[in-house]
Amino acid sequence: MKKVLLTLFVLVTGIVMLQAAEDIAGLLAKGDAAFDALDNETALQNYLQVYKADSMNCEALWKISRAYVDIGENAAEKKQKEDYAKSEKFARLAVKRCPNDADAHLFLSVALGRVALISGKKEQVQMSKEVKEEAMKSLELAPDKDIAHHVLARWHRKVANLSGIQKTFAKILYGGLPEASNEKAVEHFKRAIELKPDYINHHLELGLTYEEMSEWKLAKEEYDKVMALPVSASDDPDHKKDAAERLLVVTKKIK
């Protein structure tokens, strides 16, 4: 009798676990479908349900982080700060629980970059070190992560063009300015574009980098590409608006 009960217990437990796994896979799929449809709020709710059912699910953790960043980009100042903080929180959980997951490190670098954007100059420099480290770790684990190259490109451009106050903070933090250049930023943006040529923000940010270098024609070429490409991400309409504004500026500078 005991053997029969044990067998039944094992069978029932196995069925429950299988059902739970199927439910989680279904929620992840729904979240991904919503993300592809540019519905970040619905995507987030599905990923949060996965986290509630399985707090160790690394995929859910970094996708929650990604969703909070995307939602925060279009939020009012107070909510944006909260969303970015949540993004960092879940990305750190992902890294802690899955230290060899490239996406966990990638979205921690992304989250930190967003938090830095709304922080003071000193905090920006302090956080820049970890942003770079996490992006590089992501590329060590998966060399073809276009967003990781994008993050590193922005890091190089930011550090290469630090203000006087920020340079002082950088010297204190790094013991001198870290090696960075606009040329290296261009290299990483071009690699990101090779990996995902239809991603609008790669072209927009490369254009902004060319502007820093006074390469007006090259900047215009990238902005023209932004205007021609179809929308594929939730913030692409804003990117197209930015590109249109920059086109007016660079066109006047081309002789």
Image (tube, rainbow, N blue to C red):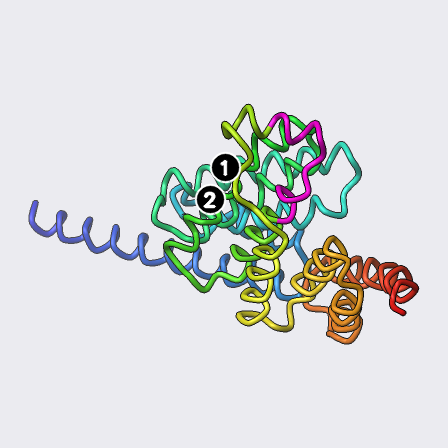
* SS for callout 2: helix
Q: Residue at x 47, y 50 (%)?
A: 60
**Residue 136 x, y percent position in the rendering:** 45, 49
**Residue 56 x, y percent position in the rendering:** 38, 43
* SS for callout 1: helix
- Check disc 2 and give the amino acid type: Glu
Label of residue 134 in the image: 2
Label of residue 40 in the image: none
- Check disc 1 and give the amino acid type: Glu
Which region is colored magenta?
Answer: 157-169
Residue 169 falls in which quadrant of the image? top right
- Residue underneath mark 1: 130
Q: Residue at x 52, y 48 (%)?
A: 107
Question: Is residue 120 in view from this perspective?
Answer: no
- Horizontal arrangement in the rendering, residue 114 relative to residue 24 (left or right): right
Whether 175 is drawn above or below 21: the answer is: above
- Horizontal arrangement in the rendering, residue 155 relative to residue 71 (left or right): left
